[in-house]
Image (tube, rainbow, N blue to C red):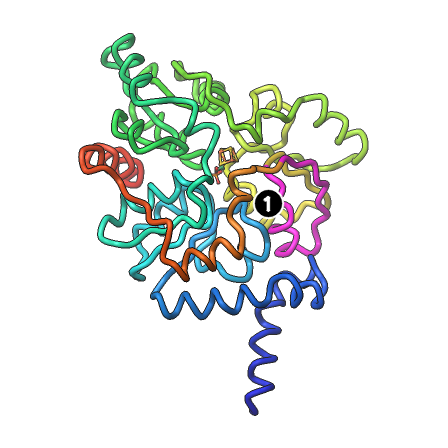
Amino acid sequence: MDQMTLVRDRSDALYAPVSRLMTREDWEQNFANDIRAILRLKRERNAVILAHNYQTPEIFHCISDIRGDSLALAREAQRAEEQVIVMAGVHFMAETAKLMNPEKTVLIPDSMAGCSLAESITAENVRALKATYPGVPVVTYVNSSVAVKAETDICCTSGNARKIVESLGVPRVIMIPDEFLAQNIQNETGIEMLTWPGHCEVHERFTPLEIRQYRRMHPGVVVLAHPECPPEVVAEADYAGSTAGMMEFVATRQPKKVLLVTECSMSDNLAALNPAVEFVRPCNLCPHMKRITLSSIRRALENMEEEVTIPDELFPQARRAVERMLAI
Ligand code: 13P
Ligand code: SF4
């Protein structure tokens, strides 16, 4: 096989996963250069790219090595063999990866990629809650800062929240900072949740009326909602689960028509993988996830920045809370 054919074949393979979403010409004009440069830099830097399910299709399908929900990314970060981890996700995800890999270099392509939940609560707020409810265990959603995790008994994600809460064997827990996730888990388990008024700015905007309107417009549509949505929205859905749970639902059940009540890129990423499923697309964009782009990832690998660091005094306690979660 001559060199030209080889290059062409490799390029076809890179384009193939997104071919349902864009023309070859658009891919070549807008993405191909950065994609090729990132793949080269990954090899040179001995780097692995972890991508959250809310990343755009060209990141999710064309350059990432590991894809998943927050739980999968936390687990896989622990197993990574490469010396450099690039987190195509938001800052708390990069911090979690660093907690599990203190000896590695963890890069976040844009350190401004935050999260409304993580920003809603401080370590001081948690200390005040613990003082008000002494002896009640604190379960903290991974969408939180390292300082908040360090005040925590155990972390959880939307994928394992029910299991984590039930594993404690207590009638009530302090579950922070996502009020809606806590209420949804309380509805599922009957365990009393003392919570905090933090919300995901993406999921709090969905309403029950909106879901009912979509059902009227698309009879028979299967509705999947993320548990960061308000309980009244979850009550309108056929299924509630983490982004990985939604992906598995679609992959295994292949509903004819599906509505994902979550961030916009989920439907694009799933549409590329499930050609027989029609996606109705009500969605809200996460401005933090969207700060991560091919060019910011390329820059991160070129300049080896921005490197995530964890203050020494917070490290042991915060890591323990994540480790306890991963052990369950
Ligand atoms: P999961 O992917 O764990 O469901 O989390 C969703 C989310 O909002 C992450 O920021
Ligand atoms: Fe945070 Fe919501 Fe964005 Fe996830 S989607 S990073 S929870 S603001």
Q: Counting other residues with Cα less than 10 Å from the Cα at mark 1, is it few (<14), some (14-19), or many (20 or more)? A: many
Query: Residue furthest toward the bottom?
Result: 2
Give the camera-side residue of 132 and 110. 110
Quarter of the image that includes the N terminus: bottom right
Asked if residue 134 lies left or right of residue 172, the reply is left
Residue reaching furthest right? 217
In front of the other: 137 or 13: 13
278 is within the stretch colored magenta: yes
Q: Residue at x 71, y 67 (%)?
A: 25
**Which corner quadrant of the image does residue 93 belong to?**
top left
Is 164 displayed left or right of 5 in the figure?
left
For the point 56% across and 20% down, the residue is 231
Q: Is residue 270 above or below residue 167?
A: below
Q: Secondary structure at mark 1?
A: helix
Residue at image position (23%, 14%) is 135
Q: Which residue is the site of mark 1?
A: 266
Amino acid found under the numbered disc labelled 1: Met
Q: Percent from the top left, x then y, of residue 54?
A: 54, 44
Residue 59: give x, y in percent of width and height.
Answer: 54, 56
Work out whether residue 233 or residue 42 is closer to the camera in this orientation and state it: 42
Q: Is residue 315 left or right of residue 109?
A: left
On the image, the x and y values in percent for residue 291 come to 52, 44
In this image, 122 relative to 283: left or right? Answer: left
Residue at the front extreme of this rendering? 303
Q: Identify the residue at horizontal 42%, vertical 67% (top origin).
A: 41
Q: From the Cβ of disc 1, is ligand 1 less than 8 Å away?
A: no
Q: Work out which quarter of the rendered image holds the C terminus and state it.
A: top left
Q: Which residues are magenta?
A: 263-284
The answer to whether residue 213 is magenta is no
